């Protein structure tokens, strides 16, 4: 990802922090779903404090549901009204909820190596990235959609034991990206691949991306 500029929404994997420090155009946001999972894991042992935090996170998602979903095929810049609404709701409704979550995390006492202690440490350690969505309406609360898109990669890896070569890995990454992009655009992947192949056969310099097939 050297030279990448834009927003990356990720879990707490440390490599992303290094990339964010290396590039001024690299904006790192963190995923609330991963925080929620940590709390769910701790909930059987610490039901009351975890329930409080999970209810607050649930309120964040409730605010997000008040904004119509932006079609995946559309660039966010084409929906200024939706972005303005999301920005306003986040400022008026989400920001106080986030402040309450922070107060909860700072006030709660737990052993560092306990499941609750680890969940709180995870949350506070990622706090700048977790709150970045408040100032940028383009950033979603989580990267669940991306993780669902990677499910095919994981299943394929188990079934055909990887790509067997560096070139094979690059080709697989290219096709996985194009196919998942087609799905996000609402374009049938088979239809897209056929159109791209036919265009390339007619003109070797042709580049056909999924969104160009939208009616």
Image: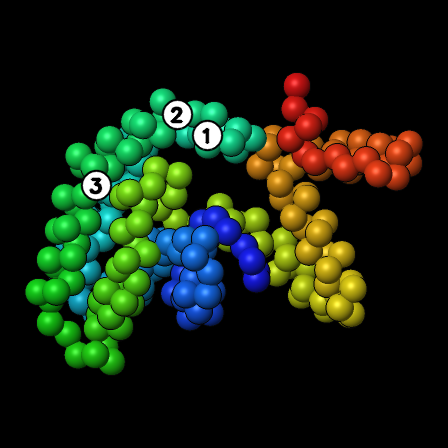
Q: Is residue 41 visible?
A: yes
What residue appears at the point 28 percent right and 33 percent down from the top-left corner?
A: 87
Q: Quadrant of the N terminus?
A: bottom right
Q: Is residue 119 visible?
A: no
Contact flag, marks 2 and 3 (Cβ < 8 Å):
no
Contact flag, marks 3 and 1 (Cβ < 8 Å):
no
- The answer to whether residue 112 is above or below residue 209 is below
What residue appears at the point 67 percent right and 50 percent down from the top-left corner?
A: 176
Q: Residues within 10 Å of mark 1 (few under 14, many from 20)?
A: few
- The answer to whether residue 120 is above or below residue 95 is below
Counting from the top left corner in percent of width and height, residue 134 is at 27, 43
Residue tagged 1: 77
Please tell me whether mark 2 sits on a helix, a strand or a loop.
helix
Residue tagged 3: 94
Residue tagged 2: 80
Q: Nearer the viewer, residue 174 or 194?
A: 174
What residue appears at the point 17 percent right and 34 percent down from the top-left corner?
A: 92
Q: Residues within 10 Å of mark 3 (few under 14, many from 20)?
A: many
Q: Is residue 29 left or right of residue 113?
A: right
Q: How many marks?
A: 3
- The answer to whether residue 205 is above or below residue 118 is above
Contact flag, marks 2 and 1 (Cβ < 8 Å):
yes
Please tell me whether mark 1 sits on a helix, a strand or a loop.
helix
Counting from the top left corner in percent of width and height, residue 145 is at 49, 46
Please tell me whether mark 3 sits on a helix, a strand or a loop.
helix
Counting from the top left corner in percent of width and height, residue 142 is at 39, 49
What residue appears at the point 31 percent right and 49 percent down from the top-left corner?
A: 132
- The answer to whether residue 134 is above or below residue 128 is above
Cα distance in 3D space between marks 2 and 1: 6 Å
Q: Quadrant of the C terminus?
A: top right
């Amino acid at each position: 990802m050297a030279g990448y500029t834009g927003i990356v929404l990720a879990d707490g994997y440390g490599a992303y922090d290094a990339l964010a420090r290396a590039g001024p155009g690299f904006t790192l946001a963190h995923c609330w779903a991963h925080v929620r999972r940590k709390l769910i894991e701790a909930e059987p042992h610490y039901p009351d404090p975890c329930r409080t935090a999970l209810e607050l996170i649930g309120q964040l998602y409730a605010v997000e549901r008040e904004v119509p979903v932006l079609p995946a095929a559309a660039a966010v810049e084409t929906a200024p009204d939706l972005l303005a609404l999301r920005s306003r709701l986040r400022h008026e409704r989400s920001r106080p909820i986030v402040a309450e979550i922070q107060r909860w995390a700072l006030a709660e006492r737990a052993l560092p190596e306990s499941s609750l202690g680890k969940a709180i440490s995870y949350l506070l350690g990622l706090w700048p990235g977790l709150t970045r969505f408040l100032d940028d309406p383009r950033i979603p609360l989580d990267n669940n959609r991306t993780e669902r898109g990677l499910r095919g990669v994981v299943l394929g890896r188990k079934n055909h034991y990887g790509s067997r070569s560096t070139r094979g890995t690059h080709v697989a990454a290219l096709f996985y990206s194009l196919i998942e992009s087609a799905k996000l655009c609402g374009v049938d992947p088979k239809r897209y691949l056929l159109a791209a192949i036919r265009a390339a056969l007619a003109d070797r310099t042709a580049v056909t991306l999924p969104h160009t097939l939208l009616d």
